Image (spheres, rainbow, N blue to C red):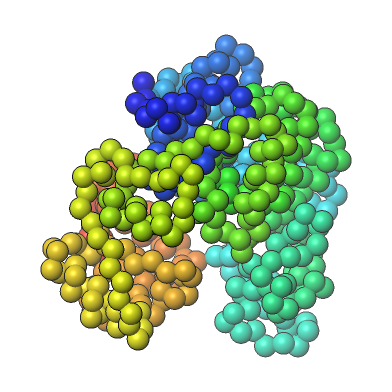
C-alpha cells in the first residue's frame, strides 16, 4: 500500500481522464506509481495493458524499480513503462516498418555521440564547400522532422542549416541504415494516420496511458496521443507542470497539453500543491515569482527545514561563486556533493565548472568532464558515480532485453575520481 496525501489520493481515485498539475517536489512519481498499480489491478485478468510514458530512461528505471517493490509480478507484467521513443519503436515502428518504404531494413538509431554523426555532418558541409565550425554539430543535432515532415529546429531557425542540407543529411543517414529520434516519432505518426487499424489495435491493447512530464510534449507526440484517443478505447492520466517546461528548443509546447486535455475531456482542476523538498523560506519567493492556483506550500518534513534566499549582484558568475558561494558552503559545513549551481543555459555553466576544477572543487555537470562525452567511458563513469552517490547497487540492463539485469555491482571509488 502506498501512502498518499489527500491531494494525491484524490487524483489517483478520480475515475475519468485527468490532467494533473504537480508543483516541484510534490510526489508526482508516487502518484503515477499508485495510479499505475491501481489500473493494473483492473486489467490483471484481461488481455489489456497499462502504458506509462516517461520523458527519460532514468525515469523509466525509477518507476520500474518502485513498481517491483510495491506490486506483484503479475501487476508489473501488465505495465509497459517506456519513453515515448521506446514505446513507438516497440509497438508501432518496428512491427509495421513495411508501411514506410523509406525506412531502412533493420534500421538503427543515430545519436549525437556516435562518430557517424560527425562524419555525416562533415560530408554535407564539404559538399557545399563550407568549413565545419564547433557550433555546426550542435546545429545539425538540433534539427528534427516536423509534424509536416519538413526540417525544423534551432539550426533551421538560425539559418545555419538549410532545409536542403537537412534533407541531404537525412538521406545519408538512411543510406547508412540509420534514423534519428525525431524520425521515430514522425514515422510512427505517419503509420497511425495512414493505417488506422494500427491505432485501433493499440487503443484496444492499452486500457490507459499515463504520461509523465506532459508539459514537455511536442506537437507530434500530442498527435500520436490523439490517434489513440480517436478510437475512444484508452483512458489518459497526464501529469506535468507548465511552469517547468524547459524543452521548448526541442518543440515542447505546454499549450498543446491543455488543448489535448480539453479534447479528451480530462479533469484539469486537480493539483498537487505540497512541496516535500523545499523549506518555506525557499517556497515563498518561488511562489511569489510564479504564483500557482492552488498556491505551492512546504509539506511534510520540509515544513521544518531551515533555509534562506539571498541576492548578491556580482560582476561575473565565477566571482560570485568564488567570493560568496564557496565561503558560504564552508561556513555552513555543507559538502560539495550536497550543493548545486543552476543557470538558465548549460553553456553558462561551462566556464564556472572549469574554474571550480582549478580550485580543486569536484564538479559534476557541463564543462566538468575530463573526458569526451561520446566515449563509452563517459556512460560507465556517470553510472558509477550515481551508484556511489546513492549508496546502492546499480542494475545495468541490456537495452535489447529491457527487464533482464545483466550485471549487478557496487562501486567503491570516490565521486571525485569519476565526476571531477
Residue beneath the point at 63% across and 40% down: 87
**Direction from residue 182 to residue 327 in the image, left or right:** left
**Direction from residue 372 to residue 391 in the image, left or right:** left
Pick whichever, 248 or 391, lies toward us. 248
Residue beneath the point at 73% across and 65% down: 152
Query: Which quadrant of the figure contains the C terminus?
Result: bottom left
Q: How many numbered discs, if any?
A: 0
Residue beneath the point at 35% across and 75% down: 353
Residue 108 showing in the rendered view? no
Residue beneath the point at 79% across and 51% down: 103
138 over 89 or under it: above or below: below
381 over 350 or under it: above or below: above
Query: Which quadrant of the figure contains the N terminus?
Result: top left
**Image x and y of residue 122, in percent:** 67, 78
**Direction from residue 397 to residue 200 in the image, left or right:** right
**Direction from residue 69 to residue 46 in the image, left or right:** right
Residue 148 showing in the rendered view? yes
**Image x and y of residue 312, in percent:** 30, 76
Q: Quadrant of residue 160?
A: bottom right
343 over 238 or under it: above or below: below
Q: Quadrant of residue 301?
A: top left
**Image x and y of residue 382, in percent:** 37, 58
Furthest-top residue in view? 45
**Image x and y of residue 276, in percent:** 32, 42
Amino acid at each position: 500500500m502506498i501512502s498518499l496525501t489527500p491531494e494525491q489520493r484524490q487524483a489517483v481515485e478520480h475515475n475519468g481522464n485527468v490532467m494533473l498539475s504537480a508543483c516541484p517536489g510534490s510526489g508526482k512519481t508516487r502518484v503515477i506509481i499508485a495510479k499505475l498499480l491501481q489500473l493494473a489491478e483492473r486489467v490483471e485478468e484481461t488481455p489489456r495493458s497499462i502504458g506509462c510514458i516517461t520523458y527519460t530512461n532514468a525515469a523509466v528505471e525509477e518507476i520500474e524499480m518502485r513498481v517491483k517493490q510495491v506490486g506483484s509480478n503479475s501487476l508489473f507484467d501488465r505495465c509497459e513503462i517506456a519513453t515515448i521513443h521506446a514505446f513507438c519503436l516497440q509497438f508501432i515502428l518496428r512491427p509495421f516498418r513495411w508501411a514506410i518504404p523509406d525506412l531502412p531494413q533493420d534500421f538503427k538509431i543515430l545519436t549525437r555521440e556516435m562518430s557517424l554523426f560527425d562524419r555525416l555532418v562533415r560530408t554535407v558541409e564539404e559538399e557545399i564547400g563550407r568549413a565545419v565550425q564547433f557550433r555546426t554539430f550542435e546545429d545539425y543535432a538540433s534539427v528534427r522532422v516536423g509534424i509536416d515532415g519538413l526540417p525544423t529546429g534551432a539550426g533551421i531557425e538560425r539559418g545555419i542549416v538549410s532545409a536542403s542540407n537537412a534533407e541531404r543529411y537525412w538521406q545519408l543517414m538512411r543510406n547508412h541504415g540509420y534514423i534519428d529520434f525525431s524520425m521515430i516519432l514522425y514515422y510512427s505518426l505517419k503509420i497511425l494516420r495512414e493505417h488506422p487499424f494500427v491505432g485501433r489495435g493499440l487503443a484496444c491493447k492499452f486500457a490507459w496511458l499515463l504520461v509523465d512530464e506532459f508539459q514537455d510534449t511536442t506537437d507530434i507526440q500530442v498527435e500520436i496521443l490523439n490517434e489513440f484517443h480517436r478510437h475512444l478505447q484508452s483512458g489518459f492520466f497526464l501529469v506535468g507542470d507548465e511552469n517547468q517546461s524547459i524543452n521548448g528548443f526541442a518543440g515542447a509546447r505546454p499549450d498543446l497539453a491543455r488543448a489535448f486535455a480539453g479534447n479528451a475531456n480530462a479533469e484539469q482542476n486537480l493539483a498537487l500543491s505540497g512541496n516535500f523538498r523545499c523549506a518555506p523560506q525557499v517556497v515563498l519567493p518561488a511562489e511569489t515569482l510564479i504564483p500557482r492556483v492552488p498556491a505551492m506550500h512546504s509539506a511534510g518534513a520540509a515544513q521544518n527545514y531551515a533555509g534562506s534566499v539571498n541576492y548578491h549582484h556580482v560582476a561575473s558568475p565565477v566571482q560570485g561563486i568564488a567570493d560568496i558561494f564557496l565561503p558560504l558552503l564552508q561556513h555552513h559545513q555543507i559538502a560539495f556533493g550536497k550543493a548545486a549551481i543552476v543557470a538558465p543555459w548549460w553553456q553558462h555553466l561551462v566556464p564556472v565548472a572549469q574554474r571550480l576544477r582549478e580550485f580543486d572543487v569536484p564538479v559534476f555537470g557541463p564543462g566538468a568532464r575530463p573526458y569526451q562525452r561520446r566515449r563509452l567511458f563517459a556512460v560507465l563513469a556517470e553510472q558509477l558515480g550515481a551508484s556511489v552517490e546513492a549508496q546502492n547497487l546499480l542494475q545495468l540492463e541490456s537495452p535489447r532485453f529491457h527487464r533482464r539485469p545483466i550485471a549487478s555491482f557496487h562501486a567503491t571509488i570516490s565521486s571525485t575520481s569519476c565526476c571531477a
